[in-house]
Image (cartoon, grey):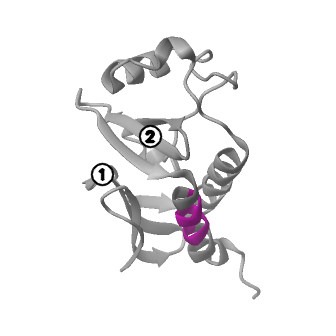
């Protein structure tokens, strides 16, 4: 097993890689958010990791001023219900830690405070909010390591 990142913030525990699946636990603040299904199809996994790297690299996720002092559980509901207007400088929001539709049992969003990203989410069948604070650079480095680890596995092999 390979662990990338810090399980107390955000980590990816890779158990096995056997095409067309990669078995990964996604850990947020010591909670396995992929406990119901941790088998990810390799091609959408790689594609969605790349998209998330691009979003993190190029995006700013500062909350709009009207949302700054809202509790995270309320923020989650606001993010879920509103397609736009949650960020100060961006017109759209997206799910994070979303790598394969078939395994998605939770919705996680992010906002930025200085150099840190604050992830917050809920399982579809729970009202408990899971949160984690991680430096933007640390999360990006973890995603890049994850991509490096799984990307070559997704490449077609010559026969």
Q: Extreme bottom residue here?
A: 159
Which residue is identified by label 2? Answer: 118
Horizontal and vertical percent position of residue 50: 67, 56
Q: Which residue is drawn at 61% across and 77% down?
A: 153
Q: Can residue 50 be seen in this view?
A: yes
Which residue is identified by label 1? Answer: 29
Horizontal and vertical percent position of residue 3: 39, 74
Q: How crowded is mark 1: few (under 14 residues within 10 Å), some or many (20 or more)?
A: some
Does 141 lie within the magenta span? yes
Query: Which SS class for mark 1?
Result: loop
Q: 128 or 66, which is in the foreground?
A: 66
Q: Which residue is drawn at 69% across and 21% down?
A: 91
Does 34 lie within the magenta span? no
Q: For the residues marked 2 and 1, what is the alpha-carbon distance in whole angstroms?
A: 11 Å
User: For the C terminus, which image quadrant?
Assistant: bottom right
In the picture, measured across the screen, residue 50 lies left or right of residue 34, that is right
User: For the N terminus, which image quadrant?
Assistant: bottom left
Q: 28 or 102, which is in the foreground?
A: 28
Magenta region, residue range: 140-146
Q: Which residue is drawn at 62% across and 74% down?
A: 148
């Amino acid at each position: 097993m390979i662990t990338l990142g810090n399980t107390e913030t955000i980590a990816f525990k890779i158990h096995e890689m056997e095409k067309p699946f990669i078995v990964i636990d996604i850990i947020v603040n010591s909670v396995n958010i992929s406990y119901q299904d941790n088998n990810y199809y390799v091609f959408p996994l790689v594609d969605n990791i790349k998209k998330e790297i691009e979003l993190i690299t190029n995006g700013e996720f500062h909350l709009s001023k009207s949302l700054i002092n809202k509790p995270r559980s309320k923020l989650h509901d606001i993010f879920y219900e509103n397609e736009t207007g949650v960020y100060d400088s961006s017109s759209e929001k997206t799910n994070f830690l979303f790598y394969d539709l078939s395994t998605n049992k939770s919705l996680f969003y992010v906002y930025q405070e200085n150099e840190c990203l604050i992830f917050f989410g809920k399982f579809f069948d729970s009202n408990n909010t899971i949160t984690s604070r991680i430096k933007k650079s640390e999360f990006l480095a973890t995603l890049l390591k994850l991509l490096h680890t799984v990307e070559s596995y997704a490449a077609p092999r010559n026969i």
